[in-house]
Image (tube, grey):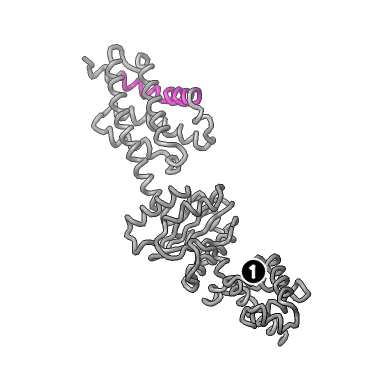
Amino acid sequence: MVTPEMRAETLRRLRAGTGRLATIALKTLDSEYPWFRELPAQERSWVGTVAQAGIASFVTYFADTSAGHRGALEMFASAPPELTRSISLQHTLTIVRTFVAIVENHSDEFAAPGAEAHLRESILRYSREIAFSAAEVYARAAESRGAWDARLEALVVDALVRGQVDDDLPSRAAALGWKPGPTLVMVGRTEGPLGEVQSAELRRTIRRAAHGALAGIHGEDLVVIARSDSALDEVTKALLPTFGSGPVVVGPPAITLVEVARSTRAAINGASAAPAWALAPRPVNADDLLPERVLIGDSSAAERLIAVAYDPIASAGGSLKETVATFLDCGRSLELASRTMFVHANTVRYRLRKVADLTGWDVLSTRDAHVLETAFALGRLRDAAALSL
């Protein structure tokens, strides 16, 4: 039977030994757990703060067990919220178990004679309070972090959609786990309007397909930005089922945030223009939709189309530019183009093959001819405007 005098003496000894208990706890963690030794100095100090608060909280609990839950929560109130990011719940419970073991092993020293079992029972009951409190603290932190991450993710994706890469964007993206490197941008539609629960489930599905991917849901428009060291073709295949029916457009390859913003704009414009190409593959690259993007007023698409499909032919010299222009103006007829240019049809065919080698577009293909036709129209307009200045 533990008398009030024995409890009072045990409480006095515990209060006098709180510093020693904290020191023993930290030394034990340092010697037995590599994860603790590898923590940065600041985070180790946070653990020390929590350990000291836990010991003080146990002393308060021992003095008045009715205040147990409140005292247990105070243990975690002394640590910054960042602790739940750097130290897992499993490691936190390891700290609690270490503290319990130390009190049990030193019960003869801190308990009054005859009260050793009572002290051990008290620390076991208190450890249960701490375990429940830790779970509650980590659950609250996860909920709060999830809400904050969702808001931050929306801000980052919205900035990339608008092409506004300011000084704060890199740090915001880094907080979400994004770092410069090969990045895939995909734009498409969801399977109809989504509620809050459906949107959250879609994001989880996207992150299972591409860990750390950012997702922006605007109405029924879905923007996915995935940084990955894996082959981007494989990431594209994994992400494709997360989109609803309709076109899915892949932006140009990107590494920096500025490039990601450009890729996002290109993919969004491509998604708007994709219906103009009825036979477009799914997914389709934004650069394969340059003519259609020009039709919706995408000035960057017009500039790129001229740069990749008109200027190389115009700069090549010889008769390539004239041959392509004549072939297109003659309704893509080899015979009519050859008669118009007074050369053999095989000569026209040979020159067009050189154009395919130069640009990658084969003017004898219906789709590629459409691309070159648009590029030549834009190039001629630009050249005419330059001459008029």
Q: Residue at x 53, y 66 (%)?
A: 265
Q: Quadrant of residue 362?
A: bottom right
* Residue 298 position in % (x across, y down): 55, 74
* Residue 40 position in % (x across, y down): 54, 36
User: Hey, what amino acid is under mark 1?
Assistant: Asp
Residue 220 vs residue 135, the one in the foreground: 220
Range of magenta residues? 10-31
- Say whether residue 18 is magenta: yes
Q: Residues within 10 Å of mark 1 (few under 14, many from 20)?
A: some
* Residue 21 position in % (x across, y down): 42, 23
* Residue 240 position in % (x across, y down): 45, 56
Q: Residue at x 35, y 13 (%)?
A: 108
Q: Residue at x 41, y 28 (%)?
A: 94
Task: Tell which residue pokes out farthest to the right in this image.
Answer: 318
**Helix, strand or loop for disc 1:** loop
Residue 174 vs residue 19, the one in the foreground: 174
Q: Which residue is mark 1?
A: 362
